[in-house]
Image: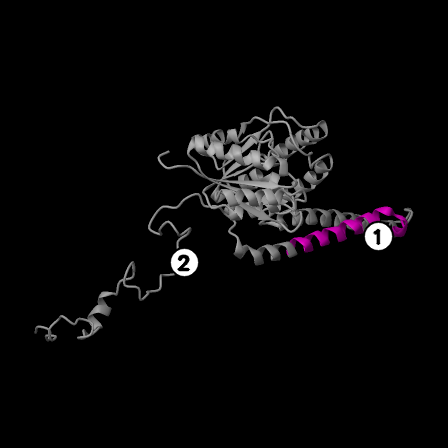
Amino acid sequence: MSHPVKLSVVMPVFNERPSLRQLYEELAEVAQAHNYEIEMIFVDDGSTDGSWETIRDLAEKDPRVRGIRFRRNFGKAAALSAGFEAAQFPLVMTMDADLQDDPAEIPRFLAKLEKDQLDVVSGWKRIRHDPWHKVIPSRIFNWWVSKITGVHLHDHNCGMKCYRREVLNEIELYGELHRFVPVLAGARGFRCGEIEIHHRPRLYGRSKYGLSRLIKGALDLLTVTFLTGYGQRPQHLLGTAGLLAFAVGSLLLVILAFWWAVTRILPGLEPIHLHDRPIVIYSLGLLLFGVQLLSMGLLAELFVAYHARDRRPYSIAETVGGWGPQSAVAPSTPAVPTDSPEGSSTQPSAEQVQNTPATAEESPSAGPSQPPPA
């Protein structure tokens, strides 16, 4: 590249004070070796071990270091969102602050991004230096996510990822959805890939995750599956299930009513008593459940319709034509003429020019107007 790469590195920090200076030095070394224009954004997510004092000291000594401190622990997704909002460069790298992610891998991420024309590159820690209670849940979770979402990555949980700026402009993180960024990006049409990276053993502190992450991850996976598949059309899911339950319940009730009538009309048949039949309760339950699902679907559709004006249901890769680089779509109404003398594309019509009398104020250097020739 003829111009230096401009890269923002976002690092959530939670009680990682002993590793921060070494991480900063390694990042600075990589930036110098490869002529990167870099900014290092440390997001202190409510640390209590003095991490913020170290970040503040680094920022005072190096203008490339920026720090954000939360009032309390809001979670990794919130820390990443704050870092993404603060990032100024077109390429954004995320990595953990515990030194297990190696900054020396950054050039390989950027090379993969450019070579394969990707929008997201995720790391794959094939050989992990973590305790078993962290590795096993992670592998189960990664297999599960790949099968359900169709975004086949070996390590969705890897904190070391590289993004193009436009990806982060279209994705909103909350809760613990940070591990699903490639899935959310893929649902918007962005291209995702991965590279195998070097994973280092933890030198300081202890892991903040364990078996409980598997349960939370399963619930988040349900949320992401719904958002990516039915976020813009919730009635298609809720309404389909509601109609099915309503139809089955109604059919069972019709059959029971018909059989109740037959046993009382035809001689020789023992009359049935519906209040002794549990199937009646099940049928009514399915009927009411179907109505509830349909009602929930309608409410969800109203919610989506109300908030859809704030977010486009599509993602544009590029535009071509006369609308200019700042316009995503063509305007639906003609442009209104402005008083600006420069850059105006609206010209007066021939009829307007003919019917507009010339005045001395409009043309000070012109002589007296002459009558039109006969």
In this rendered view, identify the residue nearer to me: 345 or 115: 115
Which residues lie in the magenta part?
Answer: 272-298
Q: Is residue 118 magenta?
A: no
Compared to residue 351, the image places residue 305 above or below, namely: above
Give coordinates of residue 346: x percent, y percent. Answer: 29, 61
Amino acid carrying mark 1 in the image: Ala
Compared to residue 314, the image places residue 218 above or below, namely: above
Task: Please indicate, yes or no, whether residue 317 appears anywhere in the rendered image.
Answer: yes
Residue at x-position 70% and y-position 40%: 216
- For label 1, the SS is helix
In this view, the mark in front (1 or 2) = 2
- Could you tell me which quadrant the N terminus lies in? top left
Asked if residue 220 lies left or right of residue 21, the reply is right
Q: Is residue 274 magenta?
A: yes
Q: Pointer 1: what residue?
A: 261
Per the rendering, the mark at residue 305 is none
Q: Pointer 2: what residue?
A: 332
In this rendered view, identify the residue nearer to me: 235 or 262: 235
Give coordinates of residue 161: x percent, y percent. Answer: 54, 35
Whether tag 1 and tag 2 are in contact, CB under 8 A, the answer is: no
Amino acid carrying mark 2 in the image: Ser
